């Protein structure tokens, strides 16, 4: 579990590093709950870990001069366009998305800051892939 924790923090650090280059200070960012793809006990462990890391993302974005707020777990059941529209209605300029997929012994972690307005630009998608077993 320690290895996947470090990997998740790495992906967040890479994605958050790009935030100031993309978003102007004072921009508002809605942070989605992590989208997780795993099974059984691994899904439960990842779920607990990811809930804490959403708070870390919000704090780090705020430290970079952005206004950040978490979206609730209910947004996980909505399609991407619906989430973007709802985040826009809540005043967000950007949506921070993170996905964790586990296939066999391999984890694929991605993170991206997505512009919600035509005047903004999205960050590159950051991808980290690692072999691991929880």
Image (tube, rainbow, N blue to C red):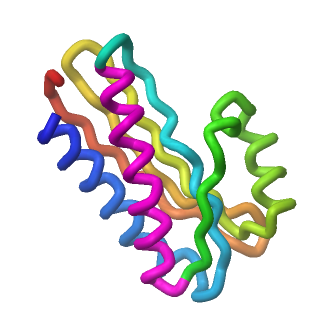
Left or right: where does residue 96 sit relative to residue 134?
A: right
The quarter of the picture where residue 68 lies is bottom right
Residue at 43 percent across and 82 percent down: it is 63
Q: Is residue 79 above or below residue 60?
A: above
Query: Does residue 122 appear left or right of residue 56 in this picture?
Result: right
Residue 115, quarter of picture: bottom right
Q: Position of residue 114 (x, y in %)?
A: 61, 58
Q: Does residue 73 show up? A: yes
Q: Name the quarter where the C terminus is drawn.
A: top left
Q: Main secondary structure of the magenta part?
A: helix
Q: Residue furthest right?
A: 89
Q: Is residue 126 above or below residue 17?
A: above
Residue 132 magenta: no
Q: Is residue 125 left or right of residue 102?
A: right
Residue segment shown in magenta: 42-65
| Number of marks | 0
Quick one: 81 or 4, which is closer to the camera? 4
Q: Report if residue 55 lies within the magenta region.
A: yes
Query: Which of 101/47 is in front?
Result: 47
Q: Position of residue 111 (x, y in %)?
A: 44, 50
Q: Quadrant of the N terminus?
A: top left
Q: Residue at x 64, y 60 (%)?
A: 30
> Front-most of 88 and 42?
42
Q: Is residue 104 above or below residue 75?
A: above
Residue at 76% in and 56% down? 87
Q: Can residue 114 be seen?
A: no
**Residue 118 image point, x, y percent:** 79, 67
Residue 5 located left or right of residue 79:
left
Note whether 61 is above or below 45 in the view shown.
Answer: below
């Amino acid at each position: 579990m320690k290895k996947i924790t470090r990997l998740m923090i790495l992906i967040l650090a890479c994605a958050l590093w790009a935030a100031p280059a993309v978003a102007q200070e004072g921009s508002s960012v809605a942070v989605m709950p992590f989208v997780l793809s795993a099974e059984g006990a691994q899904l439960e462990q990842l779920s607990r870990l990811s809930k804490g890391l959403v708070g870390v993302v919000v704090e780090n974005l705020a430290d970079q001069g952005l206004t950040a707020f978490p979206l609730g777990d209910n947004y996980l059941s909505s399609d991407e366009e619906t989430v973007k529209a709802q985040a826009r209605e809540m005043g967000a300029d950007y949506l921070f998305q993170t996905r964790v997929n586990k296939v066999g012994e391999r984890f694929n972690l991605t993170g991206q800051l997505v512009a919600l307005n035509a005047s903004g630009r999205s960050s590159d998608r950051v991808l980290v892939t690692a072999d691991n077993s929880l």
